[in-house]
Image: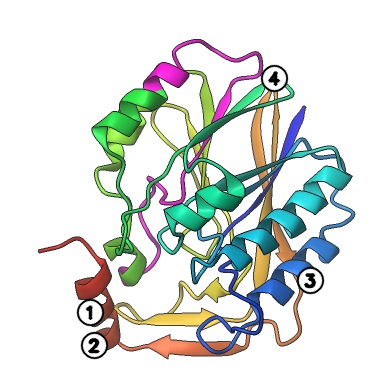
Amino acid sequence: MTRVLQLSDTHLMAAGALHNGLVDTTAALVHALEALRDVGPLDAVVVSGDVSDDGTVASYEAARDLVGGFAAERGAVAVFAMGNHDVAGPFERVLGPTRSVHDVAGLRIVVLDSSVPGRGYGELSAEQLSWAREVLADPAPRGSVVVVHHSPLPAPTVLHEGLRLQRPAELLDALAGTDVRAVLSGHYHHPFAATLPSGLAAFVAPAVANRCDVLVAPGRERILRGSGALLVDLDERGVRATVLTVPVPGDGEELFVLDEETVTRILAQAGVPG
């Protein structure tokens, strides 16, 4: 069995800065890793995008040291993906290429970059999808997992639906007929899972930085204090994902609410042009 711990949306910032002026995300990551110390054997620790919120070198160094150290203590590989808040230059300088391939005990982890500079939605170019097809042309001993920040699954809120992956069918077409067993994503700040018609499993991990309330009134966005992770087990019988809730002080506390007008404005600024 291969075990992958998936973290997502850590939204780290330079020392002393608070995410949305409310959350010390570095402290939240430290707390989450401490809470997960007894998670058991791991082969990989994946951060599926929005590693940083401010794109600073310092934030990526914190991710490298904290997540990388946690993984190294367990003999696991640390894997990082780009999200819409990440900035390619500092990311590459500290964490390596924005798309990558990792051999983890026979499991191939393929990292794609769905970020669009200056925007919140996701997109995968024809060139990148062609690259993925080439990488996946030959099967790996234990199959493959794709990590991409923007999920091919529909979003749970109006805001995230407006910032979702564009043309998700193109990604699924590129993966059809390959040995990919699961797609691991983030972005929605809420756990989500589905089995696609092809039999492919798609998972969205909860965020470390905060939690999206999917029960909010349609058109609004409500963010709560909370952290979580996803434990993904892969063996010859299939793929299983366990949502791990990380208790935090003030868990469930309302951090902020975006009204419909604000959501509309954000989508105009960060969504698909036009």
How far separated are the C-alphas under marks 2 and 4? 49 Å
| Range shown magenta | 133-158
SS type, badge 3: helix
How far separated are the C-alphas under marks 4 and 1? 45 Å
Which mark is first along the chain, 1 or 4? 4
Task: Give above or below for 114 relative to 103.
Answer: below
How far separated are the C-alphas under marks 3 and 4? 31 Å
- Residue flagged by tag 1: what amino acid is it? Thr
Figure quadrant of residue 260 = bottom left
Residue 261, percent from left and from top: 24, 87
- Residue flagged by tag 2: what amino acid is it? Glu
In this view, the residue in front, 37 or 244, is 37
Figure quadrant of residue 140 = top right
Can residue 142 be seen here? The reply is yes
In this view, the residue in front, 175 or 241, is 175
Residue 66, percent from left and from top: 75, 59
- Residue flagged by tag 4: what amino acid is it? Gly
Q: Which mark is residue 264?
A: 1
Residue that label 4 marks = 106
